Image (cartoon, helix red, strand yellow):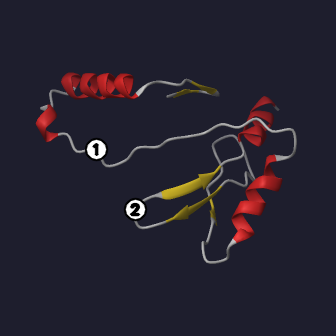
Amino acid sequence: MQKGDVIISFTSKEAQKTTTEIYRQLDIPLNKLILTNIEIGVNIQISEDPMNYINTIRYYNKKYRFSPMKPLTKTNNIKDVFCEFSEYEIKLLNRHIVKMKLKE
């Protein structure tokens, strides 16, 4: 769950409870629920420029094409990238840049 720049961890049970509450409020029966997307993120604090890691992964194997992502609102030239596969996609995000840009 994300509120502005604050990312809050939650359990699968809490995700299920939240989904159930949303469908209850919208008056949609749970047996009609089809989950089409789930996003899992891992945040790693590093001492170097995150773009060093992102570019290493991005160019490691040319078989997997990582495309630039659209910059977030109030930012420009953010170098987030993603690679789409048939069943999932991988996103490499540089949140250090986002926080610096939003503070300007």
Residue 65, image x and y in percent? 61, 72
63 over 49 or under it: above or below: below
Q: What's the residue at 87%, 44% (across, down)?
A: 48
For this view, does 97 lie left or right of residue 8? right
Q: Secondary structure at mark 1?
A: loop
At x 31%, y 28%, the residue is 16
Q: Position of residue 83 (x, y in %)?
A: 56, 64
**Disc marking residue 35:** 1
User: Does residue 41 appear left or right of residue 33 in this picture?
Assistant: right
Q: Please tell me which residue is depicted at 30% across the width and 29% down the height of the picture.
A: 19
Q: Is residue 98 left or right of residue 17?
A: right
Residue type for callout 2: Glu
| Callout 2: SS | loop
Q: Quadrant of residue 102?
A: top right
Distance from Cα at disc 2 to Cα at disc 1: 14 Å
The residue furthest bottom is 63
Image spot of residue 52 (x, y percent): 83, 55
